[in-house]
Amino acid sequence: MAVYNEEKVLEEKLKSVYETDYPVNRFQLLIGSDNSTDKSHQIIGEYAAKYGNIHLEIYGGRNGKIRIVNQLIAKHQNQIKAAPNAILLLTDANVMFTPNLLYELSKHFKNPSIGLVGANVLNIGVKNSGISFQEKWYIQRENVIKHYEGKLWGSMMGAFGACYAMRANLFIPVPQNFIVDDFYLTLKVIEQKYEAIKELKAVCYEDVSDDIFEEYRRKKRISAGNFQNLKTFMHLLWPNKKGVALSFWSHKVLRWLGPLFIIGAFVGSLLLAVNDPKGNLFYVLALLLQMLIFCIPIMDTVLKSVHIHIKLFRFITYFYLMNIALFIGLFNYLKGIKSNVWKPTKRN
């Protein structure tokens, strides 16, 4: 676990880890602090004094989650190799475990074909004032899609970085300028001919953000990382890879290209409405309908200012803003990504 100024959630997180029904003497907790300046170290120290299996490493400067995780695993490589069939569980500080989480994740590794198991991350702190309801709706459906990708083909398209487990011997250090490490590691497992699945019984809880612009900032950052992964794993898009290609195309690539489809549909409708010699009313109506839908986020913003929250309007606002984030993320990727240092998302 990499942490940066997580004093608000760390005590609850550590408490949830040690209240699982998994034997305490069967795991080690490796924590890397990215130069935290709050009370994070003190909180970890109190738990380390109580339990002998916490190892805190403090890194100077700002490194980013990926570099922290890479260094943690490298430092403890001998210890990891010494453990027979070692499993790595990567998690975020704001994700709270349920008592049977560790068992539900680890039980699948009795199957030698399984390389990675994603947890079922559920959202709490949902409000109607922002977009947390819409984000929860999206995440729930992501969980179901990923579950069936894993069940049908062993090709879950990316574990949620909040919490997932993988065979330690399959871990490959993530390139330091990469942003979306969970997707990278999942596809690296699939690339090594192992299966990646999701266990819906492995429940943990994460406080979802309600601030639409905070979520926009996060999605924009993730979008740039998505295109890094698309370039790296483009060879998995060909159909000789069992269900991997279908999952990759349908679940991820088409979504990442969504902003281009939206722009293309609008420009196409505009050209057809203006230039059709027969004056087909259908093209005009198609153009007007798109323009009307484009106006809904403005209407939603006005209504929100007077404390009126219409869920359908908020879904449309959420949809378009997240596609704008994808579009901006594409340009950020094309400009080149210099750093993966993160700023924790503001939660409820």
Image (cartoon, rainbow, N blue to C red):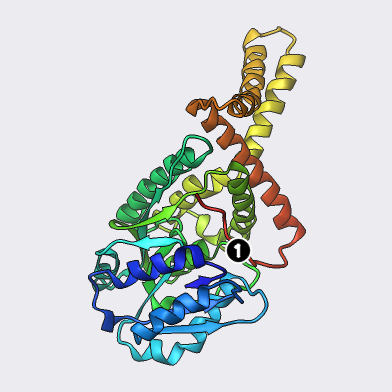
At 27% from the left and 69% from the top, the residue drawn is: 20
Q: Tag 1, which secondary structure?
A: loop
* Residue beneath disc 1: 179
At 48% from the left and 45% from the top, the residue drawn is: 250
Locate residue 160: give its quadrant.
Answer: bottom left
Residue 63 x %, y %: 64, 75
Q: Is residue 29 visible?
A: no
Residue type marked 1? Ile
Taking depth in this image into account, of 314 and 47 the one nearest to the observer is: 47
Query: Dot 1, crowdedness within 10 Å: few (<14), some or many (≥20)?
Result: many
Residue 98 x %, y %: 29, 61
Taking depth in this image into account, of 40 and 247 the one nearest to the observer is: 40
Residue 270 x %, y %: 72, 21
At 30% from the left and 86% from the top, the residue drawn is: 84
Note whether 321 is above or below 94 in the view shown.
above
At 74% from the left and 21% from the top, the residue drawn is: 271
- Whether residue 34 sits left or right of residue 267 in the image: it is left
Residue 315 x %, y %: 52, 32
Note whether 77 is above or below 312 in the view shown.
below
